[in-house]
Image (cartoon, coloured by chain):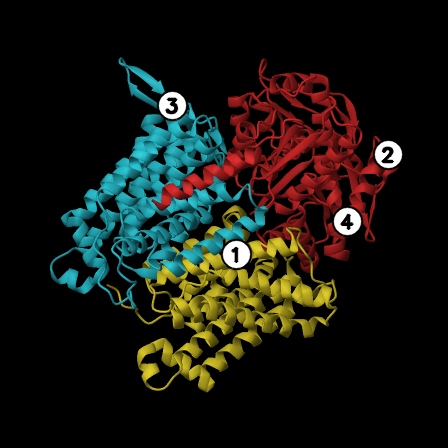
Chain colours: A yellow, B cyan, C red
Amino acid sequence: MDQLIQHLVNTAILGGTYALLGIGLTLIFGIMNVVNFTHGALYTVGAYLMYLAVAALGLNFFLALPVAILGGLLFGAAIEILLLRPFRGQDIDTTMLVMIGAGIALQSGTLWIFGGVAKAIPSPFPEAPLQIGPVSVSWLRLFVLGAALALIGLAYALINRTKLGLAMRAAFQDADTAALMGVNVRRIYTATFAMGSALAAAAGALLGPVYVVYPQMGGLAELKAFAIVILGGLGNVTGAAIGGFILALAEELGAGYVSSGYRDAMGFLIIIAVLLYKPTGLFAKAERIG
Amino acid sequence: MSRLLPLALLAALVALPLALGPSPYLLNALIVTGILTIGALSLNLLLGFTGQLSLGHIAFFGIGAYVSALTSLGFEVDLGFGYRIVHEPWPAAVGFGLATLAAGACGWLIGRLSFRVRGAYFVIVTISFAEVVRLVALNWVELTQGPLALTGIPAITLGLPGIGTWTLRTKLQNYYLVLAVGTLCWLVVARLVGSRFGRAMRGLKENESLALSVGINATRTLTVAAVISAAMAGAAGSLYAHYLRIIDPDVFAFTTTVSMVIMVVAGGKGTLMGPVVGGLIFGLLPVALRPVMAPEAQWIVYGLVLIVILFVMPRGIVPGLADLVRRRPARPAPVLEPSPVVQR
Amino acid sequence: MTGRFTLTTAILLALAATGARADAIRIGVNEPLTGPFAASGTYVVNGARIAADEINARGGVLGKKIELVVEDNKSNPTEAAAVAEKLITSDKTPVLMGAWGSSLTLAVMPKLADYEVPMLVETSSSGKITTSGNPFVFRISPPSALEAETFAPMVAKLGMKKVDFLVLNNDFGRGAATDFGKMLKDKGVQVGLVEIMDQGAQDMSAQLAKLKASDSDTIMVTSAVDQLVLLFKQMAALGLKKRVITTGGSQNPDQIIAQAGSAADGTMHLTTFLPWIPEKTPDPKATETFIAEWKRRGYEFAGVTESFRGYDGIRAIAHAIERAGKPEPAAIAKAFWSVDFTGLNGPIRFAKSGPAGRESGQSKPDVYLIEIKDGRVVVPTL
C-alpha cells in the first residue's frame, strides 16, 4: 500500500513536467501544422541556458528561470522566422524535415559548445525530502510541479483570455479566413512557435536541476512529448495536459508492478490501445478521416 | 528525366568497385548505404506514393534482421505452461525469405490496425510500434539475447543442394548482392506504381473522397502498400544482419528511420529515383565529411546540408533537377500544383 | 548525376586522407566521440594522447614516433565496425584500441578476425568479449565475473544478507547482475529484486519506490556516472537509505560528489583506479605523473577514472610493438602475450581466456572498494 501511494505521488510530480512538454508541442502542431522536431533540442537549450545563468553568471535560481524561458522564446522566434517562414505553404513532410535538420544541428551544436560531460545545476532547496507518513517528496520536485502547473495555467489563460489567444484560435480553425478577417497570420505563427519553444525551454530549465544536463537529454523527452500529444488529441491543450499525467501513471505503475524493463513500453502500448479504441486521441473532436 | 538515367546509374554502380579498386572501407560504406537505400525505397512506397508517413519504419527493418538472424542461428525458448520451442539453425537464405515474410506480415497487421486513422496518427502508431518492438528485443533475453547482441550470424549462402553452394563472405560479393536486391526492389516499386494499383494509391493520396467514389477500396489499397513496403524493409534488415554478422536492439534506433526519411524527402518523395539519389548522398555524406572536420561539426553540417537542399529544391533533388533540365523556372506555389507525374 | 558526383567527391576526400605518413607507427583508436557515450570516449582518447606524447618524448617505439589515428564510432555498433574497417584497410594501422562499450567492441570483433589485426580493449566489461574465441582481442578492463570474484572476500566483512540489483538494460548492467548474483548466492547471500533501467532514462523513481519497499539491506547498482548522479539524488528524494554499492568502473566518483552532493554520502563504489590516493596504487610515480599531466592540460579531474584506461591501453600497445620488433599485425598479436609491465591499476599481463586454440587475452587489474564520506573519497576499513 505504501508503495502504491509513493507511486501515485511520483505520478503527480512526473506528470506535471510531461504535461508541460506536451503542451508546447501540441500548440505548434495544432496551429501551424508543423511536426516540431526541434522540441527536444529546445528543451535541451532551456536546460543549458539555466545552467549558464546559474553556474556561469551566478544568477539567483528563481531569477535564472525566467531568463532561460525568455531565451527559449527568442530562440523559437528566430527558428520560426529563419527556417519556417520561407517554407510556409510547403507540405508537412518538408517542414518536418527542415525541423529534423535544425534539430540535428542544434543538438550537435550544444555538444560542440558544452562537451558531452553532464552538468549539474545547483538548487536552493534542501536535500532532505518532505516526509508525510510513508511517502517522501523532494522539495525541488514539489517546486517543479508547482511551477509547471503555473506555466500551464498561464498558457491556458493566454490562449483563452487574450486577443493574441483569440487570433491563435482563429488561425487554428482556418488560417485563410482568419487572414481575411485581418489577423496577421505570419505574426501569429511566430508568436505560437515562440510560445511553444518557451514552454519546451521551461520544461528543460525546470527539469535540468532535478536531473542532469547533457546534449542528448532532448531525444527521449521529444519522443514522450509526441506520445502525450497524440494521447490528448492534436492541438488540444487540455488533452495534452491530461495525456501527460496518463503517460506518467502508465510508466509508474508499469515499472512498479509489471516489469521495469518495459517501463517505457507501457506508454506506447497505451497509445496504441487508445488509438485503436478512439483513433483521434482521448480528448479531440473527430478529425477528418479519409 | 529520361528512362536512361536509372540504367546509367545502375551501370555506374555495377562498374564502381572496379574503379574503386581494393578499398574495403569505401565498399563497406557503399554496402551499408545500399542497405539503407533499400529501406528508403520501401519507405518511399508508403510516404511518397500513398502519403502515409511510417516513422516506425525501422521496426520492419529490425524485425527482418532478427527473424533472419534467429532462423540461421537457431534458438530455444520457453513459452511457459510447459511449452518449449526449439529451433535448429536453417540456411541464411531461408532466413532472408522468412524475414521478408515476417516483416510483410507485421506490415499487414499495422495496416489493418492503423489505417482507420491517417496522417499524424498513423505516424504515432508506427513510432509506438517500433518502440514496443525495440523494447521486446531488449527485454526478451531468452530469445534475442537482449542487449548481449546476437553474434556469429552466418553469411548468406546462395545455391541449391546438389548443384553447389556459394557463400557470400567478401565485401565485393555482398556489394553485388545488395545491388541486386536493391535493383529488384526498385523494379517492383516501378512496376507497382505504373500499374492500376499504383493509380489507386496516388488517387488516394491526391483526393481520398474522389478515389472512394470511383470504387477504390482505401483500407485494402493502403494495407497492400504497407505489406509490400514492410517486406522490402525486412529484406533490407536481413541483408544488414548477414552482412554485419552481429545485431543488437540498437538496430531499432529511431535515428535510422530519420535517416531513411531524409533520404526519401530530400531525394524527392513520390519519384522513383528520389530515394536512390537521396540515399547515395546522405548515406555517403558522413563518409565524405569524416576526414575533413571534427565529429560534432560533421553532424552540424549534415543538418545544414539537409536544410539547404530543401531551401533550394523544396520538393527534393530529383524533381528539382528535373525542373532545371526542362529549363522551367520553379513555379511560385508548388502546393497548388497537381501532383507531378511519376518521374522515371 | 548528383549521386555520382557526390560519390566521386567522397572517394577523393577519403583518398586524400589516406596519404599515409610512412615514418610513424600508426595506432588506430576507435572510440565514441559523439552520441550518448561521447563524454567517456573523449576522456579515453585524451588519456591515450597523453600516453602517446609521453612515449614520443622518450624517443618513440622502435626508433619511430607513434601516431594515433582517432576515429569517432558515434556510440553506434554499425559505425564502430565501419570505423575498424577504415582504420585497418585505409589507414593501415597494424593495431587498434577500442571501442569503449561492449556492444561497440562486439561489433568490431568480426572485423579483427577477418583482417587478423589485434585490438586492445580498454573499457568493455561483457564476458562474451573474451570467451567467444577471438584470438585478436586483448582486454585490460575487468569483465564483471572477474570484478565479482575480486569483491567476494569483502561480502562477509560488509555483513550483507540480502541484495537487490538495479542495473542498466544492456550487457554491462545485466552481465553484472548475473555475475554478482551468482557470486553472492555462492557466499550464502540472498538475491532479491533485479530491477532494470534503460540507458538514458532520467527518472528511476518507480524502480526506486519498489526497491524502497523491499526487505534487502544492500542495493548493487551498475550504470555510468550520469545516471548514478540521478539515482543518488532520487534515492535521497525518496528517503531510501540502504547501503548502495556500484560496480562497473565507470563511476567517476568526483563527478558524483560534485553533482549529487550530500545525496552521494555513504555510497560505496567498486573502482579499478585510485587517483585520490596515488600512494596506494601499484605504480605511485606513474599515477602522479599521469594525473599531473592530465591537470596541466586543463582536463576535468573527474575524467581520470575513465582516461587512465586509454593511457594504459596505449602503453600496453607500445610494449607489444616494441616486443614484436616490427609494426605488423601478426607480430604484434603474438607479442601481446609477452607484454608484462605495471599499469596504473595493477600488472598488465594477458592470460588465456576462451575456447582452446583461439584464446583471447585477459589482464587482471586490481579492484578497489571506495566510499564517499562527507564529500571525499575514502577507502573503508573492513
Query: What's the CA distance linking mark 4 and mark 2?
Result: 21 Å
Q: Position of residue B314 (x, y in %)?
A: 35, 60
Q: Amino acid at mark 3?
A: Leu
Residue B186 x, y percent position in the rendering = 27, 40
Q: Quadrant of residue A275?
A: bottom left
Q: Which mark is residue C284?
A: 2
Q: Name the kind of residue labelled 4 in the image.
A: Gly
- Alpha carbon of mark 1 to alpha carbon of mark 4: how far? 27 Å
Q: Depth-wise, is mark 2 or mark 1 nearer the camera? A: 1
- On screen, B64 above or below A245? above
Residue A61 as seen in the image, left or right of residue A172: right
Quadrant of the drawing holding the C terminus of chain C: top right
Instruction: Identify the amino acid type marked 1.
Output: Ala
Q: Give x and y (percent) for residue B57.
A: 37, 47
To the question of a shared chain for discs 3 and 2, the answer is: no
| Mark 4 element type | loop
Identify the secondary structure beneath mark 1: helix
Q: CA distance from mark 4 to mark 3?
A: 50 Å
Residue that appears at 48% across and 51% down: B302
Q: Tell me the residue that label 4 is attached to.
A: C298
Q: Please give left or right for residue A110 compared with residue B112 in the image.
A: right
Find out whether the residues at labels 1 and 4 contact each other: C-beta distance under 8 Å. no
**Nearest to viewer (mark 4 / mark 2):** 4
Which class describes the residues within 10 Å of circle 2: few (<14), some (14-19), or many (20+)?
some
Mark 3 vs mark 2, CA separation in Å: 52 Å
Q: Which residue is mark 1?
A: A105
Q: Give the percent coordinates (x, y) of residue C314.
A: 70, 31
Q: Chain of mark 1?
A: A
Find out whether the residues at labels 2 and 1 contact each other: C-beta distance under 8 Å: no
- Who's the residue at 66% across and 57% down the image? C234
Q: In the image shown, does A151 or C159 lie closer to the viewer? A: A151
